[in-house]
Amino acid sequence: MSLRSELGRVKGLGSAKEGVGHWKLQRLTAIALIVLSLWFVTALMSVVGAPHAEVVAWVGETHVTVLLLALSLALFWHLQLGLQVVIEDYVHTPWLQIALQLAVRTFAALGALLAIVSILKISLGVN
Amino acid sequence: MSRSKPLSPHLQVYRPQLTSVLSITHRLTGIALSAGTVLILYWLVSAAGGADRYAAAQTFFACWLVKLALAAWTWAFFYHLCNGIRHLAWDAGYGFDLKQVYRSGYAVVLASLVMTGLIWACVLSKLGGAA
């Protein structure tokens, strides 16, 4: 017999053994993305068709650099959380499920790193 | 003797409704948007790679087929954004009345189309001016 209270036992657990962590993070990154992605799509209009030097100058502005970095983090995090649920819901073959989850995580991690390094390279003038 | 029991409806014989179609579209656009990040990454990496690489990327993005894919991606983005806000409102406990669910559903479809049109009108006018 365990002496732990019912609440203590159930807190932060549930069938996924991680409580509401995933659900919460998906919403938090979603709210961040409402602001960041809307900013990105509208701000991008100022450099559509612009030559390289102009794009570099735009990315290099401090607030643009920071917002692009924040966008990269939120985007690839949200992408991983969302695709994870889709795979959990529709892929029922155990080995395939694990392989796909690994592939999605690898893609999201590398994508985020690639975006962040590219943004920093441009911003810090490492060319 | 076996008695036929009622079965839960199978998707193939279940009449599509606005609610169910918009729901699965949210997931499909999420998957499409994820795949589309490859294009954004290509654009960023080219910009970081110098003027020559960026010029090559610009030639690639000028192709009408790529533009068409980007336009579809833009719609997927605005749909997922608008419907995502709809989901957040549901998470907060608002808009569950059936009438409201349908009204917000049609609003999401309309808003996503209008926003996509506005962005591409802007893109095409900019490119027209540059060419």
Image: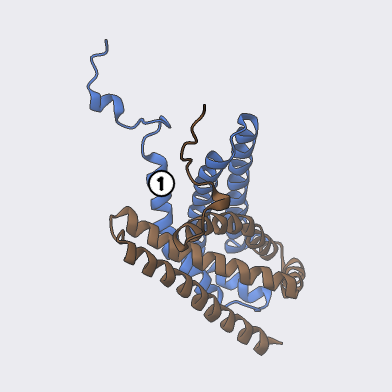
Given the current orientation, which residue lies at the most extreme top position?
Answer: A1
Seen at 46% across and 63% down, the residue is B18
Q: Does B33 appear above or below A82?
A: below
| Left-right relation of B25 to A55 | left
* The colour assigned to chain A within the rendered structure: blue
Q: Amino acid at mark 1?
A: Leu
Q: Residues within 10 Å of mark 1 (few under 14, many from 20)?
A: some
* The colour assigned to chain B within the rendered structure: brown
Quadrant location, the C terminus of chain B:
bottom right
Seen at 37% across and 70% down, the residue is B103
Residue A37 locus on image (x, y percent): 48, 64
Given the current orientation, which residue lies at the most extreme bottom position?
Answer: B129
Look at the image and name its color scheme.
Answer: by chain
Seen at 49% across and 62% down, the residue is B80
Residues A53 and A94: in front is A94
The residue pinned by badge 1 equals A25
Given the current orientation, which residue lies at the most extreme front position?
Answer: B1
Specify whether residue A44 is in view.
yes
Q: Does A104 appear above or below B81?
A: above
Q: Secondary structure at mark 1?
A: helix
